[in-house]
Image (cartoon, rainbow, N blue to C red):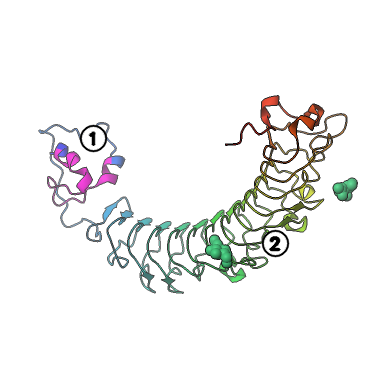
Amino acid sequence: MRTACLSLLLVTACWALPFHQTGFLEFMMEDEPGSGLIPEHAEPEQPRVFDEPKCPFRCQCHLRVIQCSDLGLKVVPKDIPDDATLLDLQNNKITEIKENDFKNLKGLHALILVNNKITVIHAKALSPLTKLQRLYLSKNLLKDVPANMPKSLQELRIHENEITKIKKASFQGMAHMIVMELGSNPLRSAGVEANAFADLKRVSYIRIADTNITDIPKGLPSSLAELHLDGNKITKVTSDSLKGLKNLAKLGLSYNEISTVENGSLANVPHLRELHLDNNVLTSVPPGLPDHKYIQVVYLHVNKIAAVGTEDFCPPGFNTKKAMYSGISLFSNPVPYWEVQPITFRCVFDRTAIQLGNYRKK
Ligand SMILES: *[C@@H]1O[C@H](CO)[C@@H](O)[C@H](O)[C@H]1NC(C)=O
Ligand SMILES: *[C@@H]1O[C@H](CO)[C@@H](O)[C@H](O)[C@H]1NC(C)=O
């Protein structure tokens, strides 16, 4: 009987066990090894007609995971079990989240609404979700970050929407947030209000790529380990913008319009390991690299750097760096690579770590 179910997996129906909600997840989560290959004479499962938990029509419910993706749904289904921990509604045609759509889902940990057509989330719709940790809203038509998001939230993905401004009020008191993905939104020049992220005391990852912001957001929390701001219109790295980021390990600023990195910027991020500044309009190597103890990767390819001095990367004399460089790229700059003195790279792990000439260029 079970083998008949297996062959029908792709149509998500299982005729052999009509009273038992069966689906892909169940096969993935079966305890017994070799499940799905139980011989014909095995004990048939007890049909659980009356104690079967409710499950929205056409969705699949198993172990408090409610799967309702790719069903062409235009609204959030009713009768979602109250004890659901994960609700997956991605790839549907939902246009609106109404006030009571999630009213009873007090145990929900993850809500996935990626790739719908949501323009509005009612201001009270998310308030009942007091245990919510992950909220995935990417690929919708939202013009604002939702109001009253649960304070329990640890991860917010709201990539590819139509948000023009990130307001300070949006993230007030969200002390548990760890990951924020806000990229590919039409954020304007000053699209992130100062101190918008100041309350995120534990945040470790922020990505705001491919927007029109012209500055590094102000007042970033000191917990930040990764900041990805690639593909924006940032013109300058000011030392103030990186002040206090003592945990920052990765800074991505590729594909911007950066012409200057202020002296003192790198001193403000003493634990930086990777700095991506390729595809900008820098005319010199950023100041402060020789004094930096931990930086290992510096991408500077495709800029307008016309000269590289012997003291640009490494400390003079005795090597005081705690970590050698493992990657430096300088190709596609106007500096003639044969004019760069080999001694410039005396604190680099090995020669192959340096991409200097144009041989890498496509
Ligand atoms: C940035 O601004 C330009 C000009 O106003 C606009 O055409 C473009 O769509 C904007 N990009 C994004 C990602 O919002
Ligand atoms: C940068 O600042 C340091 C420390 O204040 C100073 O010693 C150095 O000369 C400055 N470099 C430039 C290029 O201004």
User: Residue 70 location in percent, x, y?
Assistant: 30, 55
Image mark for residue 81: none
Q: Does the magenta stretch include residue 322?
A: no
Above or below, comparing residue 121 to residue 299 in the picture: below
Image quadrant of ligand 1 equals bottom right
First in sequence: mark 2 vs mark 1: 1
> Mark on residue 219?
2
Under 8 Å from ligand 1: the CB of mark 1?
no
Image quadrant where residue 347 sits: top right
Using the image, tell me which numbered label, if any, was put on residue 35.
1
Q: Which of 309 and 286 is in front in this view?
A: 309
- Look at the numbered disc 2 and give the secondary structure of its residue: loop
The residue drawn where x is 36% and y is 73% is: 100
Q: Position of residue 118 (x, y in %)?
A: 40, 67
Counting from the top left corner in percent of width and height, residue 321 is at 79, 34
| Eye-nearest disc, 2 or 1 | 2
| 165 to 108, vertically: above or below | below
The CA distance from mark 2 to mark 1 is 54 Å
Amino acid at the residue labelled 2: Gly
Residue kind at label 1, given as amino acid type: Ser
Residue at the image point whose x is 27% and y is 34% from the top: 32
Segment colored magenta = 4-27
Magenta-colored stretch includes residue 13: yes
- Taking the image as shown, residue 121 lies to the left or right of residue 318, namely left
Q: Give the quadrant of residue 330.
A: top right
**How far across and how far down the image is residue 272, in percent?**
71, 43
Q: Is residue 68 above or below residue 298?
A: below
| Lateral position of residue 89 relative to residue 237, left or right | left
Q: In which quarter of the image is residue 215?
A: bottom right
